[in-house]
């Protein structure tokens, strides 16, 4: 750990900083220590709120030269709270918010401090979007570097499949642009390899024609869950790529759009997003409406894409307690379904849930060696989360999530979507990257041999 802790000395080291230097005792410090997961409580020595690339470069060099632990924060949504650290430097990108849409090339350049809600707002004005998660307050950087799941994945692939280039500051303080031509090895690594290789100051994404979508939830009684899951596993793997739907076990929130008789009832559901021609929507949703058992709630409607993206923001505001467990899933057997239902009946809190996000369709069009994201053959990214506002409920929801995961893990494909992982050790990281891990280690050795960027799902170069 570095020795410089005097504020005056630090101010000298950051004399050219255009952003803000925050240390313990400053009015903003306690609030800026917080991340999305309220279960995480860490106190860095300093938080550097960068305003431009020079600020980022200076901060990286300072942490390297003074041997400080360095955490990188974009939107702060990371499951394990890896955007903050104890007794180190937090490089905070949240002041870097520029978004530039190019309608001629259908691309967008996004600075590293943006959230997806900010990007979606800018691109929606032109009827364009790219794959961008399911909660609008999610940071662009973290979601992208882990792969990028979302409502548009079956149609347009993962977020990394739409990444055209990135500007980044490396561990030695140098600035590079990476793409298929320039530093192609590094470009390969950041598409799924997390924050191991540098600080991304801006991303360039391919956009697609998405304005309004046909979207919303359908809910079924928990007693019908087995039939619904059996139908869903076949339906979503063969459905047109215009249609996405993630499966969930949930406790129905006590408010609109859900009718009062369903409030706080444990149910299963699917959240749909259809991006195809509106005139085809009736036929697309017909088998869902006519399914036996029929949905107890049918909430599918037309809405602007950003409205779907922000639909869960109110239910999951920053600061809740979160505990995550995840796996990739290729086959959803009847035995696995029975276990899912067993644990769904025990949902420990209203916010706790299990999601199966489809990653077939366009995601399968890219080979498992073409990007660092390895599980291209999987059909779902599964995640079990214990969530609640009250820390007193942590033990029961953590135990539930762990037990659920341990029961279902033997039916998984191994590995997990890294954005759904807590700090789980190197073996889980290797299981996630599989045959790509050794190549990631070699790239890490080349660009970050001292492992400066290690507050992440770390690929250790040593």
Image: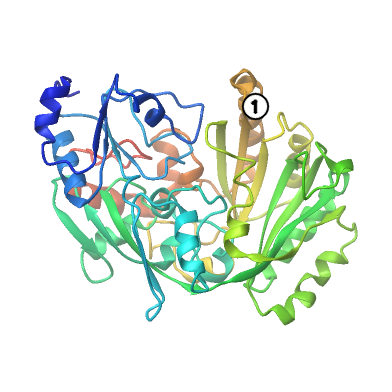
Q: Which residue is drawn at 41% across and 76% down?
A: 106
Q: Residues within 10 Å of mark 1 (few under 14, many from 20)?
A: many
Q: Residue at x 34, y 23 (%)?
A: 43
Q: Position of residue 94 (x, y in %)?
A: 35, 44
Q: Mark 1 points at which residue?
A: 397
Left or right: 412 in relation to 159 = right
Is residue 181 at all visible to an observer of this figure? yes
In the rendered view, how is the structure colored? rainbow
Is residue 358 at all visible to an observer of this figure? no
Q: Give the position of the C terminus as an image quadrant.
A: top left
Observer-nearest residue: 397 or 451? Answer: 397
Q: Where is residue 70 in the image (x, y as percent from the top left)?
A: 26, 34
When asked about the image quadrant of residue 331, the answer is bottom right
Q: Which residue is drawn at 49% across and 61% down?
A: 120
When asked about the image quadrant of residue 385, the answer is top right
Q: Position of residue 184 (x, y in %)?
A: 25, 65
Q: Residue at x 15, y 42 (%)?
A: 58
Q: Where is residue 139 in the image (x, y as percent from the top left)?
A: 43, 48
Left or right: 258 in relation to 126 = right
Q: Give the position of the N terminus as an image quadrant.
A: top left
Secondary-structure class at tag 1: helix
Left or right: 249 in relation to 426 = right
When asked about the image quadrant of residue 345, the answer is top right
Observer-nearest residue: 315 or 428? Answer: 315
Q: Vertical placement of 279 versus 26: above or below?
A: below
In the rendered image, the residue lying farthest to the front is 27
């Amino acid at each position: 750990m570095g020795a410089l802790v005097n504020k005056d000395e630090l101010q000298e080291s950051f004399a050219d900083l255009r952003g803000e230097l925050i240390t313990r005792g400053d009015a903003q410090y306690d609030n800026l220590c917080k991340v999305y997961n309220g279960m995480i409580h860490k106190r860095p020595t300093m938080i550097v709120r960068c305003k431009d690339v020079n600020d980022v470069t200076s901060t990286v060099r300072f942490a390297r030269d003074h041997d400080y632990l360095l955490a990188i924060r974009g939107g702060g949504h990371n499951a394990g709270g890896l955007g903050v650290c104890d007794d180190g430097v937090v490089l905070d990108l949240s002041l870097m918010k520029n978004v530039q849409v190019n309608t001629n090339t259908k691309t967008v350049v996004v600075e590293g401090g943006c959230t997806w809600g900010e990007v979606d707002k800018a691109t929606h004005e032109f009827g364009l979007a790219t794959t961008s998660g399911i909660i609008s307050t999610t940071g662009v950087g973290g979601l992208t570097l882990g792969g990028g799941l979302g409502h548009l994945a079956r149609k347009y692939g993962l977020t990394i499949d739409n990444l055209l280039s990135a500007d980044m500051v490396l561990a030695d303080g140098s600035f590079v642009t990476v793409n298929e031509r320039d530093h192609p090895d590094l470009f390969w690594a950041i598409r799924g390899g997390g924050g191991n290789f540098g600080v991304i100051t801006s991303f360039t994404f391919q956009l697609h024609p998405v304005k309004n979508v046909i979207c919303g939830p359908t809910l079924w009684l928990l007693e019908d869950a087995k039939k619904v899951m059996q139908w869903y596993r076949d339906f979503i793997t063969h459905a047109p790529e215009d249609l996405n739907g993630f499966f969930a076990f949930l406790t129905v929130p006590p408010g609109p759009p859900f009718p009062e008789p369903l409030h706080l009832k444990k149910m299963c559901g699917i959240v749909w997003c259809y991006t195809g021609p509106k005139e085809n929507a009736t036929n697309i949703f017909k088998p869902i409406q006519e399914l036996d058992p029929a949905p107890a709630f049918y909430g599918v409607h037309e809405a602007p894409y950003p409205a779907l993206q922000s639909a869960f923001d109110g239910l999951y505001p920053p600061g809740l307690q979160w505990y995550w467990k995840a796996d990739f899933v290729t086959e959803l057997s009847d035995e696995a379904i029975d276990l899912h239902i067993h644990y769904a009946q025990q949902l420990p809190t209203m916010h706790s849930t299990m999601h199966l996000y489809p990653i077939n369709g366009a995601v399968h069009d890219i080979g498992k060696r073409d990007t660092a994201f390895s599980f291209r053959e999987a059909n779902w990214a599964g995640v079990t989360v214990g969530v609640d506002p009250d820390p007193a409920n942590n033990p029961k929801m953590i135990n539930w999530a762990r037990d659920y995961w341990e029961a279902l893990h033997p039916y998984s494909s191994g590995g997990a979507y890294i954005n759904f992982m807590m700090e789980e050790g190197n073996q889980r990281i290797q299981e996630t990257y599989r045959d790509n891990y050794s190549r990631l280690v070699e790239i890490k050795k080349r660009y970050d041999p001292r492992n400066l960027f290690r507050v992440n799902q770390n690929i250790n170069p040593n």
